[in-house]
Image: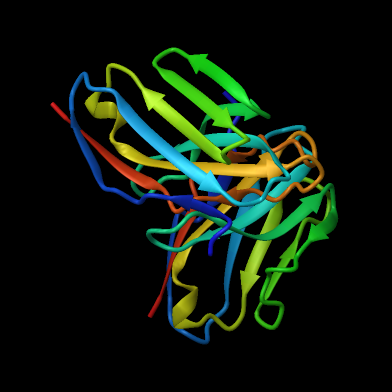
Amino acid sequence: QKEVEQDPGPLSVPEGAIVSLNCTYSNSAFQYFMWYRQYSRKGPELLMYTYSSGNKEDGRFTAQVDKSSKYISLFIRDSQPSDSATYLCAMSGESDYKLSFGAGTTVTVRA
Amino acid sequence: EAEVAQSPRYKITEKSQAVAFWCDPISGHATLYWYRQILGQGPELLVQFQDESVVDDSQLPKDRFSAERLKGVDSTLKIQPAELGDSAMYLCASSLYLAKGEQYFGPGTRLTVT
């Protein structure tokens, strides 16, 4: 079983819809949680960065962390065709610097 | 905006040949990482540097891969000899501090071994 599980999709939504992405994990030592966006043939771009449990909002993006359930989510409101990409979740521990990544979810926003 | 630079962006090589990738991290970032990303998967850490020192190379196939960061700034990852299974995207990332989680990635080098 992988340390971080992420549904690879693909996920296709109409423009303006809410995109909901999630990851589950097994390592209770994880404290830092990140979401990266990766366009085709490009490097991952850091979107959201949260520490421990709770919510964080940045524009159209909201990240949620539920450590009790070992579950993290990313919501994209008012989705745009430019949001079409692969979204990777990643996490690391307080003293363990390694990032453990999910496999990524491919999202297509249809105009 | 400061970015991680990598070159080349694309590389095609024949198996058994040597290949090298270069990375220049964001200025002031002490920690540098090399990842390998196979198509359809998340990146996996190969090696991590803190300044010029290797912090973790436990996942680096040392029989054919080597990495260095001689002056604690830019870094080179080498594969010799390349094998068909090495075809992947090689990503470099950097961060200000060790164990802070916030890593910034370069555009990657896509390697194809024929």
Which residue corresponds to the image point at 62% horizontal and 43% vertical from the top-left? A91
Residue at far top of view: A59
Tell me residue B43's x, y (percent). Answer: 53, 55
In the figure, residue B3 lies in which quadrant?
Answer: top right
| The N terminus of chain B - image quarter | top right
Question: What colour scheme has been applied to the protein in the rendered image?
Answer: rainbow
Tell me residue A42's x, y (percent). Answer: 41, 45
User: Which residue is at the front of the view, B36 or B100?
Assistant: B100
Q: Does residue B100 show up?
A: yes
Residue at far bottom of view: B16
Q: How many marks?
A: 0
Reply above or below: B87 against A52. below
Reply above or below: A100 against A78. below
Which residue corresponds to the image point at 58% horizontal and 61% vertical from the top-left? B21
User: Which residue is at the front of the view, B107 or B100?
Assistant: B100
Q: Does residue B106 show up?
A: no
Left-right relation of A100 to A20:
right
Which residue corresponds to the image point at 76% horizontal and 33% vertical from the top-left? B96
| The C terminus of chain B - image quarter | bottom left
In the figure, residue B41 lies in which quadrant?
Answer: bottom left
Left-right relation of A19 to A73:
left
Reply above or below: A107 against A104. above
User: Which residue is at the front of the view, A67 or A11?
Assistant: A67
Reply above or below: A33 against B22. above
Which residue corresponds to the image point at 46% horizontal and 20% vertical from the top-left? A62
Tell me residue A1's x, y (percent). Answer: 53, 64
Left-right relation of A80 to B71:
left
Tell me residue B101's x, y (percent). Answer: 69, 38
Residue at far front of view: A68
